[in-house]
Image (tube, helix red, strand yellow):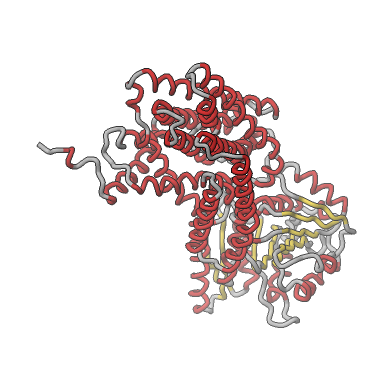
Amino acid sequence: MMNFSSIFPVSEPTWIFLGVLCIVLFAPLIFNKLRMPHIIGMILAGLLIGPKGLNIIERDDSFELFGNVGLYYIMFLASLEINMQEMKQAKGGALLMGLAVFLIPIALGMLSNMFILEYGLMASLLLASMYASYTLISYPVVARYGLSRLRCVNFVVGGTIITDTLTLFVLAVVAGIFTGEASVWLVIWMLVKLLAIVGLIVFAFPRIARYFFRTYNDSVIQYIFVLAMLFLGAGLMELAGMEGILGAFITGLVLNRLIPHSSPLMRRIDFVGNAIFIPYFLIGVGMMIDITVLFNGGGSLLVAVVMVTTALVGKWLASFLVSKAYKMSTGEQYLMFGLSTSQAAATLAAAIVGHEIGLLNEDVLNGTILLILVTCIVSSIVSDRASRRLVVSKDLLARPAALDSKKTLLALANPTAVDKLMDLALLVRKENSQIPLSAITVVLDEDKKLRRERTKVLDLAAEIAASVNIPLLTKMRLTTNLAHGIIHEVKENDYRELIVGFHQKETANDSFLGGVLPEVLNALDCQVVMARMNIPLNTIRTIHITFPAKAEYEAGFSYWVEETARMASGLDCKIMYHGHPDTMSKIQQMLNNYDPIDAQFFETDGGNDLKRLASIIHDDHLLIIVSARRGSISFRPSHDHIFVQLQRDYQNTSVLLIYPGAYKVEGGETH
């Protein structure tokens, strides 16, 4: 008969990793059928196979290492997902949420700890602070439903840094007082170190990252760089005597605008975290849970019941208070409650430190493990159900919808510009659109050598689209006339936007786009965007848009306003509008329907403003020129001089030249 005790627990790294992969693979499949969040499956699987359960897999150092990575990843992803413009508007709500989630559970905890559990003042304070902290365990659930940018989610995510900072600060002070090491100077020194580290991260990290992204374009190197910055931020925070999760969160905040949500880099960060690191962390949490404490006498059970009840009631009251203060729906209230309920990192850290210095007994340590299990399960279930409720509720449909998604065609030729044109198309693409992008390269049919070169161009574009899981249709079109090839492709497939790169001019007298542009504009009614990106899009700091008077009467006015607003939101950068006040007022009205952006408005006469702008635009700015076709209502003769001015004054500037969509008339020409 086989002796299983000689086989289990498995301690070989190969088999441990295989076991983890099996859990990561099958837990979502099983729990999706049960209609339960798969996060619960990860935690329960860890409980089952761990040393406190069936003892199948040994909890080796890999769970400590990857567990820390997974925890930092959760905080990092949460801060990367934040819409910083909405966060700025919601900073009052985040502050209120953070303080409410901290103060209410602490107040309830002090009462229950002192009068029900009969603990002393210091033990009661430390235990009460543990009820206040929370880890965004169920954040991936909310992100999967596309709700990560809701106001209520921003409140909870922003409140995390306030609550966990206060909780860990209380831990450090209480531990110092209990061991006799605390003093006023110690508290001041901790604050000085904390502020210094935060200042270093906020000031230095964005500048280092901006330089790196401009210099290195390799996707693997960029991902490793981001991971290094994440752990550098976490490590620096630990030097200040705080938990690394705060450093990870702040690092995500300062890198937020440099990693657009639609970018391939963001998709890689999200993929690796959700595939390996975050599941490793959740399984490791489950392996620490000891369910047998329920049967070891009444002490642990009573402590666990009091801890769980106090934590849940405190978080519910805090969510209720904030929801009423900001007139939120019931669904938003429960989503805040679900996100802020789960306890993990800071709670466990406080329990372990308190136990090691003799302030908290074994019952509290066991109760903490059960607190983590129950709150993680409650958090996952409540967040999942609240997310489902919000997705189908009218609450999310109250805001006017943006324009319908349009079919976009990229005309590709220059291999060095493919990544920048693709980044642009992905950035302005409507989120969750089901319409695929399309890319075409037009080749004269007798040029066989160029055909082979352009095939590589299309392959590169397809690779970039695949990295962000966006469908891309590619096509090589053989023709005897380049302009006719583009025109027929657009008309045959009813594309509403054409994106092309700037023609590389050899001489000052060389006709722009080799004569292709005038013929294309005359034959097509879709929006045409010409792009010259001298630096990566994610390093743009300010967008300037200049537009002619009466631009609001053009057919494509709403489309370019929405696209540029989406671009500013995705890059989280300031956008400056330069144009006639009548057009400006229409733009301001439209911006109320979109995600908030940091917009400034400068009134002009609506003429050619490029000479004035040349003195205020820097190399890390993006100039967007809204032009017009000949014969349209907003066309001015000065538009004919745009190309000369760009060559003279804007050689080092990234430029988008937009010809808005025109009204179609009989005969095929546009106006």
Residue sitting at 42 percent across and 19 percent down? 302
Judge whether residue 472 can be spotted in this image: no
Residue at image x 46%, y 31%? 359
Q: Give the x, y percent position of residue 34.
A: 39, 30
Residue 592, relative to residue 664: is it above or below? above
Quadrant occupied by the C terminus: bottom right
Q: Is residue 551 left or right of residue 23?
A: right
- Front in this rendered view, residue 577 or 282: 282
Residue under the image location 51 percent in, 47 percent down: 244
Q: From what the image shows, is residue 665 above or below residue 443?
A: above
- Residue 522 position, x and y percent, is 74, 65
Comparing 591 with 452, the one in front is 591
> Hey, which quadrant is residue 327 in on the image?
top right
Q: Is residue 383 left or right of residue 195?
A: left
Residue 49 position (above or below residue 642): above
Residue 407 % position (x, y): 61, 53
Identify the image quadrant of residue 604.
Answer: bottom right
Residue nearest the viewer, comparing 564 with 666: 564
Instruction: Name the one closer to the observer, 131 or 664.
Output: 131
Q: Is residue 361 above or below residue 468?
A: above
Quadrant where the image shows the N terminus: top left
- Residue reaching furthest to the right: 605
- List the single residue furthest toward the front: 180
Residue 51 visible in the current orientation = yes
Q: Position of residue 466 (x, y in %)?
A: 48, 57
Q: How many marks?
A: 0
User: Is 241 positioned to the left or the right of 668 in the image?
Assistant: left
